[in-house]
Amino acid sequence: MPVIEVDKLFKEYKTKNGEKKVALNGVSFDVHEGEVFGLLGPNGAGKTTTIKILSTLLLPTRGSASVLGIDVIRNGEQVRSQINFVYGGEKGVYGRLTAFEYLSYFCVLYRIPRKQQKLLIDELITMVGLEHAEGQQIYTYSKGMIQRLHIARSLINDPKVIFLDEPTIGLDPVGSKMLRELIKSLSKKGITFILTTHYMSEADELCDRIVFLKNGSMSSIGTPKQIKEECNDLNVFEATIQLFDQSGLENEELISVNDLQHITESYKTIKLEFKKNLDISELENVLKKYCQVIKIQRKEISLEDAYIYLMKDVE
Amino acid sequence: MNILSLIIKEFIYFTNLNNRIYQFILFVQPLVLLTIIHFMSVMKGIEITGPYIIATAIVSMWSYVLYSSGSSLIWQKWNDSLNLLIAAPVSLFQIVLSKMLSNSLIAFISLTLTLFYAKIIFSLNIGIAHLGTFIFTAIVLLVSLSVVGMFLAVVFTTVQEVYSFQNFILTPVILLSGIFIPVESLPFTFRIISYLLPMTWAVESIYSGLNETNDVFLLAGVSLGSSFIYLFILFFGIRRMEKIMKQSGSLGVV
Ligand SMILES: Nc1ncnc2c1ncn2[C@@H]1O[C@H](COP(=O)(O)OP(=O)(O)OP(=O)(O)O)[C@@H](O)[C@H]1O
Ligand SMILES: [Mg+2]
């Protein structure tokens, strides 16, 4: 049985000026035990809305959703002790408390037996690398330190399902690597994750499966590999060139330049998308009209390429 | 018991005695009020009796409960921590209740402080005949203040516009709950509102304890009874509030 079942979720918000805003328009998916499931999509696609519904903080307008076999819309209270969540950003903390005090407050909220609390908190604080700041008031913390604290908080009840809404926002490279390793090791132990992120490489590395949301609807679902294969007609090349006719290149109908980077004054690397299925030598011939080609190679499609390709019609 | 741990945590972690308003209410205001009644008594030649002193104490207790409890949920909504409280297995009702009880504990300290000031600085005779009865009625008063605090916390969070009127609630309630003016002397409509406030009964109960009349426990009972009715309504009210916020997506700021 799947750990998370989402069926035709539909959410409509009423905005202040009386208009209605459809945030989710029939989203359905299943997530299995120990899976890291990515929710990707542009700003406003409905990722946070989905996570809030699943973590019992928001009620959908229609549709059903269950976590660990419990209907989160009707019986949200019953699932709370077994799930937890992190949302990115600096809010949700009490600035005057220390990290230790903050976590010990949440220990009480999650009914952790008093005898286990200290050991658990020390363990979590070490796990997220905050031991040097444990006794410091949270208002003195940096953005990433608060983020680490939220990660520690989310593990306090030994949850079976964890929702992560842009959890690496503000983390330094070491911090985000720590989080990625943590996610990997916990998912090996059977903990299920739903993750949203705008960092495609992170999603590629972590997610077993991904759903792309677009204006509240699902546009693709599958493993990162399957999603990239959906973009097989995408021909991405990378070329290093010495350009003599920039406007000509920009107006060329057969190719589109995605990305122009200057290496030096005269040498540039460009990322190209070839609109027809032509091979590399034909592409080189087209390019030669505008520049001298120093190096050209077919690029393996990254999740980011796939994202940009699949989301290109989003306003 | 978990609710007890919760109250202790609330008391230790969330009592903000660095807040200037609270400092004033708890430590300075009793002094100011006692000074006022002291000079009034000197000018008019009246002796200050127990009820006067207690009245000043109740004003401080009420002010503290109003300011601390009233805002206790709404700032968590702005701070985006209300989400986290609601997502936790402990019910929001329990969390709110523990906050209010912890605030009442502070209010109790403020009562003691007033009595201490009265005795030490102003050398007044408070005249508490039965200490046991007095403490009992004071606790009844605290219970009533707690539920009213809880009630305001929920109203302020649900209808944010009301929150800006916080200051306008302070004095009318002092006038309505019979702290200074006997409720019987109020116009009829105001009297009705008075009797709907559980504090009114508790205040009367304290005063009759001091005056050694025999309706102390009846009045205390009415106060406790109405407090429990409030609590009962609040239990469902808080659930309703939670549900409405979950439907509209207004639990947090984002
Ligand atoms: N409380 C609310 N009231 C009204 N509209 C809302 C509310 N919350 C979200 N929305 C709208 O619903 C849509 C989906 O929002 P959501 O927060 O789920 O997006 P998201 O995919 O998480 O975006 P981002 O990447 O920016 O975090 C947006 O258009 C947003 O404006
Ligand atoms: Mg979001």
Image (cartoon, rainbow, N blue to C red):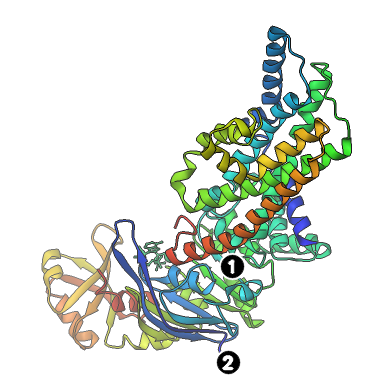
The quadrant of the picture showing ligand 1 is bottom left
Vertical order, B194 against A36 (above or below): above
Return the x and y of residue B220 as percentages of the image width and height: 76, 45
- Towards the viewer: A307 or B162: B162
The residue positioned 83% from the left and 33% from the top of the image is B212
Q: Visible in this render: residue A142?
A: no
Residue A108 placement, left or right of B65: right
Q: Which residue is mark 1?
A: A179
**Residue at image mark 2:** A1
Disc on the earlier residue, 2 or 1:
2
Given the image, on which type of amino acid does mark 2 rest?
A: Met
Between A228 and B244, which is closer to the camera in this rendering? B244
Q: CA distance from mark 2 to mark 1?
A: 28 Å
Contact, mark 2 vs mark 1 (Cβ under 8 Å): no
Q: Which residue is nearer to you in this view: B220 or A213?
A: B220
Residue B205 location, x and y as percent?
75, 39
Q: Does residue B27 appear left or right of residue B66 in this picture?
A: right
Instruction: Report the number of numbered marks.
Output: 2
Would residue A291 appear left or right of A199 to someone viewing this image? Answer: left
Quarter residue B16 falls in: top right
Establish if B248 lies above or below A163.
above
A200 or A114, which is in the foreground?
Answer: A114
